[in-house]
Amino acid sequence: MTGMERVLAALRGEPADRRAFTLALSLYGSRLSKCPTKEYFSDPRRYLEGQREVARLVDPDVLFSPFALPFEALAYGGEGVWLERFPPNIRKPPFREREEIEPLGDAMFLDRGVSYLVESTRLVAEEFGPAKPVCAVVTAPVDLPAMLLGIETWLEILLFDQDRARRLLDIAVDHFLRLSGAYFAAGAAFVAIPVMFANLRIVTQALLEKTILPELTRAFAQAKGPLVYHHGGNRIVDHLGLCSDLPNVAGFLLDPRDNLSEARDILGPGRLMLGNVSGPGLARMLPDKAYASVSALLADRASDRNFVLASAHADIPCDTNPDTLLAVRRALEDAGAVA
Amino acid sequence: MTKESVTDPGARREALYALMLGAQREDALAMLLEHAGAHGFQSAVSDLLEPVLERAGDEWHRENLSLAQGYVAGKIAEDLLVAAVEAGGDLLLDVKGPVVIGNVEDDYHSLGRKMVVVFLRAAGWKVIDLGNDVSAKDFVDEAVKHGARVIGASAMMLTTAENVRALRTEIDARGLRGRVRLAVGGAVFKLRPELMDEVGGDGTASSAIQAPELFDRLWAASLAAEDL
């Protein structure tokens, strides 16, 4: 079976020759292709070369477009920072507290960073798409204002200035729809959305239910393809039930601290569930331990056809031992078919 | 029953906690000011705010409290401190410390630091807040200048947490290890607890509300090291 066939089997709850899996190896491609990080995250052809190496070494069933969300915010201004062995980041958010933010519209695609993201997706999908689905990653509309203004200002607005929050969310939803639409047009099979501000570790239940979820519903309902809801760095099982009916969400990626059986009970049978190996945690894991940990996880999910083994949290760090990644793959092969 | 009519201290604390959880900042401040009017600002802090913050800190540690609720708690504490200063009341400010706080070099995520500053001040600490993007040299220069025994360094991400190493090196290079303790904090330290040792921190807290307890401990450790 191809990666695409395995993923579709998981989506439909059908048997497969082995468990579908993916690891967030966007950044790791720079290590494998020996490309300086700045060049890797600036030139789509270098990104493609890196993903070729990822496919050659690890051969995951799903490949990623660049995991570089800060480019979305930097299209509005602000100051980026480049550090070797890390993806680009935001040094200073584009806006200060009191400024009104203007929507970019399609002008966002003229921005160098955003055009790099879309073009990289197109190149990877063109080369691998039929066999390996390509997953693009987009900032959640409820998180974009935090990247534009800083977390503190966005939190203050969400809590105490509902009118301004609504205006910002209108801009963020428009941004989300344009960019996710561009990714689908470029060949992405689905779009993953790490969601931070829909989490009870971050917001109150009242904010979640009255403001956040209605905005996610509005945005996701207009998406041009299937979405994967990414836990966004915190556990989500305690409010997963509130998010489980969000439109166009094909699957949920769980936090490593989330209990998968509990999540399955909440989602019910037939819903795609992904998880929940800690991506950054692999950097500190010896191959034997990674093998044992993944084997245990797969044994726990053995009867769950709608499960895809995936790394959670952020990109897998550059200093992760390649043998650890291969141990994950070996555990997967040794676990055998999905009956 | 209105919140003003609640006279039992336990019930008042319960009411204040509920207002904080519901992000009702103005009502919470009104309750604290009403208490301060009757019993003084020090009592409003010691008998109402601090026990509520302690409980909030425990719940935050157990991940039962959201960042938004912690943020509101900080705002309520800040509002009360401002009111106390303006009223020139009996509140004991700047009775501990001083300590030096800042975001490490290249880190501009100020939310956590600002919350720590508020909770420290509410607990009586004198805080020298150096702001964002503070070099290792500036941290130590300011600590020496003010006689601070604790430096608090905040970093949100792994990339910037790595810059704490330079601060550790600077403290040690000036022969201040033991005397000047290094408190580290930020989202990444909660996600990767082993990072504190890796970058050379002397202690961390799992939430901003718990920072005063950490600083008490580190200050005491600094004094104890000097007695040896």
Image: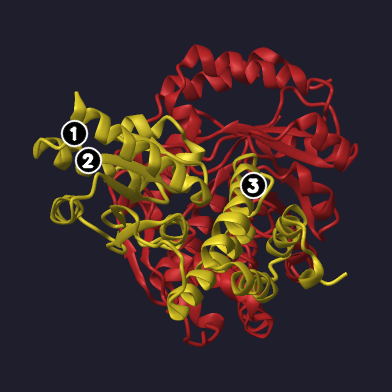
Chain colours: A red, B yellow
Tag shown at residue B55? 3
Disc 3 is placed on an element classified as: helix
Give the vertical position of B224 relative to A123 (above or below). Answer: above
Give the vertical position of A131 relative to A151 (above or below). Answer: above
Q: Quadrant of the N terminus of chain A?
A: top right
Q: Nearer the viewer, residue B32 or A99?
A: B32
Asked if one can make out residue B195 in the rendered structure from this viewpoint, the answer is yes
Residue ranking furthest to the right: A269
Q: Is B145 displayed left or right of A315 in the figure?
A: left
> Which residue appears at 47% of the width and 68% of the height?
A150
Task: Read off the chain for label 2.
Answer: B
Task: Read off the chain for label 1.
Answer: B
Which residue bears the numbered disc 2?
Answer: B180
Of the numbered discs 3 and 1, the one sitting upstream in the chain is: 3
Residue A156: x, y in percent? 57, 72
Foreground tag (3 vs 1)? 3
Report if the CB atoms under discs 2 and 1 are less than 8 Å apart. Answer: yes
Badge 3 local density, few (<14 within 10 Å), some, or many (20+)?
Answer: some
The reply to whether label 2 and label 3 mark residues of one chain is yes
Report if the CB atoms under discs 2 and 3 are less than 8 Å apart. Answer: no
Residue A259: x, y in percent? 74, 31
Q: Quadrant of the C terminus of chain A?
A: top right
Q: What is the distance, in whole Å, between disc 2 and disc 1 at their CAs?
A: 6 Å
Report if the CB atoms under discs 3 and 1 are less than 8 Å apart. Answer: no
Disc 2 is placed on an element classified as: loop
Which residue bears the numbered disc 1?
Answer: B177
Query: Given the image, on which type of amino acid does mark 1 rest?
Result: Arg
Of the numbered discs 2 and 3, the one sitting upstream in the chain is: 3
